[in-house]
Amino acid sequence: MNQLKLNEMIWQVVALIPKGKVASYGQIAKLCGYPNHARYVGMTLKQLPDDSELPWHRVINAKGEIAFPEGSAAFLKQKTLLVKEGITFNGNKIKLSQYRW
DNA sequence: GTTGTGACTACCA
DNA sequence: ATGGTAGCCACAA
């Protein structure tokens, strides 16, 4: 199962996130079998093309916030996508009830 | 082989 | 409660 490279596993795990839910980087890294690789998850997602089908917007940090600085284009894009998916925001933070899946 | 980097997390003051 | 600092480890050059 772990023959794949981390980025491929990350793609798989992120793709499994149900609509209307979000997961933290650490959570994803853990599911991949690498509890301490939260950072690498971000690196991998960053390398994804913008037209990827991967729901990278459902991936947030452990605080329940989007990892980008507020006002950033990617931030706004992600937030918009999440809202469309039914995620509710409390300012820049996502409601914790939707944090896990 | 070493060095630098990072869309993070946990801990401590 | 908040803010800052250190640690983590895979990948690219």
Image (spheres, coloured by chain):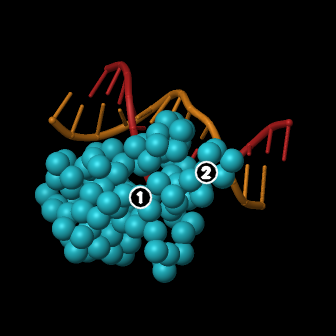
Chain colours: A cyan, B red, C orange
**Residue nearest the viewer, comparing A27 with C9:** A27
Residue that carries the numbered disc 2 in the rendered image: A6
Mark 1 vs mark 2: same chain? yes
* Closer to viewer: mark 1 or mark 2: 1
- As displayed, is residue B10 above or below residue A64? above
> Picture coordinates of residue A23 (x, y %)?
34, 51
Residue B12: name its quadrant: top left
Q: CA distance from mark 1 to mark 2?
A: 15 Å
Residue A8: name its quadrant: bottom right
Sequence order check, earlier mark of 1 and 2 = 2
Left or right: where C4 falls relative to A100 = right
**Residue nearest the viewer, comparing B13 with A81:** A81
> Picture coordinates of residue A101 (x, y %)?
29, 49
Q: Chain of mark 1?
A: A
Residue ID at (32%, 60%):
A18
Residue that carries the numbered disc 1 in the rendered image: A16
Could you classify mark 2 by the number of other residues whose Cα lies within 10 Å: few (under 14), some (14-19), or many (20 or more)? some
Residue A43 in view, yes or no: no
Residue A8 in view, yes or no: yes
Q: Chain of mark 2?
A: A
- As displayed, is residue A100 above or below residue A12? above
Which amino acid, by three-letter code, is at mark 2? Leu
In the structure shown, which secondary structural element does the residue marked by tag 1 occupy?
A: loop
Q: In the rendered structure, are the residues bearing label 1 and label 2 in contact, judged by CB atoms less than 8 Å apart?
A: no
**Residue nearest the viewer, comparing C11 with B7:** C11
Which amino acid, by three-letter code, is at mark 1? Leu
Residue ID at (41%, 58%):
A16
Left or right: where A1 falls relative to A92 = right
In the structure shown, which secondary structural element does the residue marked by tag 2 occupy?
A: helix
